[in-house]
Image: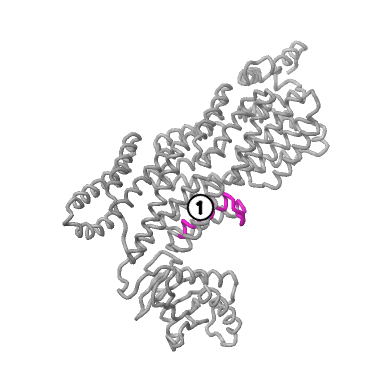
Amino acid sequence: MFLTEKDNNFLDGLLDFRKYKTLHEFFVSIIDNWSVILFSELLPVHQAIVSYVLMIYFHYPRLDELYTKYPTIEVASNFIPVLTRQGQKEKIMNIISSFSEESINEALIISQIDLLIWKSYFHVHYHEFTEAEELISLAERKIDETIGKEQFQTTYYQQKALVKNTLVVLFDRKKDHHQAIAECKQGIKLLEDNNINDRYLLGTLYNSYGNALDIFGDPLAREKFEIALEHFTKNNVKRGMAVCQGNIASLMIKEGRFEKSLEYCFLFIEIMEKFQDQRNILITYNLIYSSLKSLGRMEEAEKYLTKAFEHMDKYKLENDEIYLDASEFYALIGDFKLAEGNIDRYYELLKVDEKETMRRATWLMHKGFIELKKKNIYRSEQQLRDGIRIAKKQHYATLVLQGLIYTIELLLTKYRMEENQQIKQKIIDEIELHSQESVVLLREHKSIFQMVNYEILLATVYILTLKLRLASDILRIARSICERYNLQKQLEEIKEKEVIVKSLLALSEQSEREKEILQDQSKFEHTLGFHSTRGVKDATYISTTEEKQDILYLLIILPSGLPCYSYNFKKERLHDDELLIAGLINAIQKFSSEISIEKGVFRMLQHSDYLLLLEPRETFTIALFTENFAYKIKENIILLADKVEEEDIDILEKRGFIKTEELLPITTKLDELLKEIFVES
């Protein structure tokens, strides 16, 4: 095709963006006159302008055609973000490697900077943070060196804001949401102070701002999403509009509007499939999973969780939220191997360190939840406590709430195990305190669905403690919210509890029947799901941590059933035949594993006139004989097992026979540990 001088004049006018009222008008004009543009010899500056507009509207086919004709830095820099969202890692790597340093230096300086920014954006999405940070620093230096040039003054400020947006994505992936918010504010200020009406970039920054606020449970998140939606709508950026709708769908989950959220999600996926935006499709699979799980449709939920993993594998994507959700889901259904595999992948992906960051708090809480489901109560309690402490320190309200959810479940488990009525009451008081804190936080952050769940839980606590008027008031408030938001599942649960409260109130009004109330309370505990452990003899009780530790004898046993270490805490020997006792305990363990699918759980067995506490690990078991069961004893035996693993004490070889002299170094080390943990603590 040959162009006349008249055609060239037309092309100059066509690509003069100043004559268009909106960016969308410019985009429509480019598409309508595509054949003229494609068969023209575009100047580098025009290549940059056309590819930038096509990038904003995520028009892959036209960008691909343009890059095929002009495999230049100007086009490539704006092609990379589209390919990144589509998960085309190999194609991006090929494009990047095709440019020599010389060809990059010959490109427009604004395109060189764009290439650095979008390359860093690409590395961020694949969790290659070091590479991304180096490129961002280089881009900032180049901008600062050239920003004084008047020709592209506005563009440089625009690029500064684009750098801020890339930093937002970086800090979001690194779970430093405080810094992400700071970068959002700086980017928006740069554009507004310099009167740069780039509605695409403003919309993107406001959308990221809303996402970061939502992490903290800040109700202003919706406002930021709506501002972003307004910017995208005014320029008819359909992909941006859909992303905002997807974020609003996420808020609907917090409000308990799961069916409505699903509607938004399926519409969102339909739009993202048109753009082949694989990253947002992955995010939406996760949202659909969350809605279905909350509706109790677990088989469908697992189907979308599986689709998310298949999608990640197909497009070589990573998403830490998928790993977290999977760890929780599989812990819920009792598949601890998969649960731990996913939380370990999260750990590896984000390189969790010892610093008190949100990512560490998140990891601790999910680890605590898995341990809770495995019945490792005291290890779970420590992890949850640490996670909540960090989340509170960093002001992550939504993470604090998640930790409180898990902690209350843990306390309910302890309540069921406990026999001492005074300790049971202390546990109830602690549950009430955490429940009230949760309700206050949920009201503040307008999470309707979760708030109702916690009001129901709080009412349950009041029923157990016979604070019946308070229970009745809470249930009445929760009922009105459920009716307003059509939360049928919760409404049915409220009605069941209202029947219980009504019955108890009727009894309490008759003072001569107070004893009957106390007797009936245990029946209601059963109805409410609070089942206490039975079968421990009267002389045995669960003591407080401050009481004397009446421990007698400790034995460490290999998987073969051979004893490799023993310690008497009393002068008189409890057993003369360690080999016989070790064999007996090993047989009990094997029998127990045959009838239980749970691995690694703490076991308490009654044996003659004392209790036998077992802490099984993969390569050894610690057996402790004690006259009573104090929390401190349980904590100490777990601590000892952890120390044995940490110290890598080689007591674990599977041999048919172990010579006594080979055990001397081991015995000395274990004696030190026992003195430190059991005697001095």
Q: Residue at x 59, y 29 (%)?
A: 203
Q: Horizontally, is 213 left or right of 7 in the view?
A: left
**In this picture, is 498 found above or below 109?**
below
Horizontal and vertical percent position of residue 648: 60, 72
Q: Is residue 524 above or below residue 16?
A: below
Is 361 included in the stretch rendered in magenta? yes
Which residue is more in the foreground, 268 or 307? 268
Q: Nearer the viewer, residue 641 or 89?
A: 641
**Residue occupied by mark 1:** 388
Residues rendered magenta in the picture: 349-371
Q: Is the image coloured rainbow, by chain, by secondary structure, or in one colour?
A: one colour
Q: Residue at x 39, y 41 (%)?
A: 449
- Specify the amino acid type for callout 1: Ile
Rendered position, 20 above or below 667: above
Q: Residue at x 28, y 57 (%)?
A: 525
In which quadrant is the N terminus drawn? top right
From the viewer's perspective, is 465 left or right of 163? Answer: left
In the image, taking residue 63 as reference, residue 487 lies left or right, namely left
